[in-house]
Amino acid sequence: MLPLAVSCGETAGIGPEIIARSYSADGTPRFAIGNPTHFEGFGVSVVPIDTPAEARAAMTKGLPVLVHDIPGPATPGTPQAAQAPGVVSAIARAVELTQSGAASAVVTAPIHKKALQDGAGFAYPGHTEYLAALGGNVDVVMMLASDALRVVPATIHIALSEVPTALTADLLEQVIRTTAKGLTSDFGITAPRIAIAGLNPHAGEGGAMGHEELDWITPLIERLRADGLDLTGPSSADTMFHARARQGYDAAVCMYHDQALIPIKTLDFDRGVNVTLGLPFIRTSPDHGTAFDIAGKGIANPTSMAAAIDMAAQMVARRAAAKVA
Amino acid sequence: MRPKLAIVPGDPSGIGPELIAKLLSEDGVCQAADIILVGDAHLWQRGAEQAGVEVTLNTIEEGAIGGFEGLVHLDLATVDPDQVQVAAVTVAGGTTSLRCLDKALDLAQAGLVDGVLFAPFNKAAMTSAGLNAEDEHRYMARYLGFTGYHSEINVLDDLMTTRVTSHIGLKDVAANIDAPGIQRAIELAHATLARSGKARPHVAVAALNPHAGDNGKFGSEEIDIIEPVVKACQDRQMHVTGPWPSDTVFLKAKRGEVDAVVTMYHDQGQIAIKLMGFERGVTVAGGLPIPVATPAHGTAFDIAGQGIANVSATRQAFDLLVRMATTAKTEAAL
């Protein structure tokens, strides 16, 4: 397998640390992209490399770090404006190397939007939107995945009061279709079963607590079903996520951020992975932030980064198997 | 002080009578309280048969209830045995549900019992029988002539959740988040926890918006409304914290760091509670003058009459009710 390309993320955050600490000599081949000195001090040998082709051999000695221009030392907790352009271009380089066939997938460490806005004029609301632009302005969805559950929020970082207007039939259709395709191409599920949450409590209870289900969510689900998609819902969100209910679907499409994030984080906080579906390449990331408060202390939990790397490797294997078949 | 509790069988088409029969045969139940079973003898016999356990009905006259001890039974005639059907929404099932509940509330209001436990009701059956209220909580408040603030509280093990908004459309939630509403939900959690024996409970308040609004970037309700209420509670020496992002606040609960989470809307709390313990959840009629508890699950028509219903939520409801009723009784005695 080609190595995974792991962008370093915000240098003042826990990115370099969790990348270093999720390294093991016999792990999935990967290389970080960043300033090699930023990865030092976490009890892992760092091996600077100049091309991705060196990564596999370097893995036996330590964490391979593809040298990238990010000037100066890491300053935990305090972002450096001079480093912001390098943090952004490390993401673009990971994508480029993956698309050119030098790496197998993109794994990203957390970025800090404000630091990148201030230091590099970064105009995207987040990683996902930037990657969608790099991938050719494709329709993407954010999936949170763990061993126990996969969820896709149809609306994400907006106020709860804006959800009912932001959520449209066109948006939901795109989210459902992109999710179904991604489950097939990247998770190897040939006929994915998708559960759709209601927007309102008790999924509206026949119009008693909100009308969106009756007005357009149910008709949309019926139309997509007639088109061959295996969908259930709209279901009462509070009874969709217990163990028995989760057996009935491969992913749940939720209407807003916390409807999706409450169940996955409450179930499996450490091993949640952020997956972007719809891109021409595979991308995963840990589902936490830069954690400035604990950066540089050597106490960050690398579990989610390790899970993101594992999941990227599994997705690469499935895409490869699908191509052969 | 050993409390006296009234227990009603719930809708006989469901698993209610079976659950109560199982509850009564659990270790420690009849030792923890004096219990009066309120309802037709055939309903309790039916439950015992379904559960495969013995329930001895020590029937007493209504006039002799004062100072009862042990396990006794108040016989009613609310439904003909022939009218009881398994796994069916019936007017008869709704009628017996309501009349048994009414009698238990009468006993509580007369000071003859310290709390009421009911097995699951079927809302459609009760509605057809004249519930004439949004749910059984509103029905009970009206029956008791109680006009103060009350709201259902969802309980899982040692965690309670109260809500600022409940059964309304999501588009109406933000407009209904206001300081008095948050204050009431905090105080309800606080008072109910105190009643259940927590001297200085930690009440965590959930945010409305993702990432608690991220400093106003996705919604300003946290800054404008929620934070000032939390601050005011802290100024009154209450252990209240928040607003916390709702996708991680339940992890604090899982770790035992908080006793209650005040949620802004229905699914925020219900998703987490049902996910963490679908089998064990309890609902408390928060704010009512008498302690009332019930298992959070429904009548489970799919398994009714088979003897396989899981008693754990009913047991949790009973144990919590014993604590609440004991406190209420102790306070009344002071």
Image: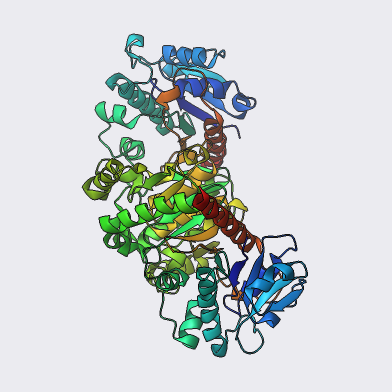
Residue B261 locus on image (x, y percent): 50, 54
Report whether residue B267 is seen: yes
Which residue is pictured at 46% across the width and 40% down the height? B283
- Residue situated furthest left in the rendering: A215
Q: The N terminus of chain A is located in which quarter?
A: bottom right
Question: In the rendered image of this protein, does residue A197 appear above or below residue A142?
Answer: above
Report whether residue A210 is seen: no
Residue A269 occupies quadrant: bottom right
Residue A286 locus on image (x, y percent): 57, 63
- Residue situated furthest top in the rendering: B82
Residue B270 locus on image (x, y percent): 44, 47
> In front here: A229 or B196?
A229
Which residue is pictured at 70% across the width and 60% down the height? A27
- Residue situated furthest front in the rendering: A324
Question: In the rendered image of this protein, does residue A305 appear above or below residue B256?
Answer: below
> In front here: B189 or A32?
A32
Q: Is residue B155 left or right of residue A295?
A: left
Question: In the rendered image of this protein, does residue B253 appear above or below residue A223?
Answer: below
Which residue is pictured at 33% across the width and 15% down the height? B79
Residue A221 locus on image (x, y percent): 29, 45
Count of numbered tags: 0
Q: In this view, does A71 lie to the left or right of B121?
A: right
> In front here: A33 or A256?
A33
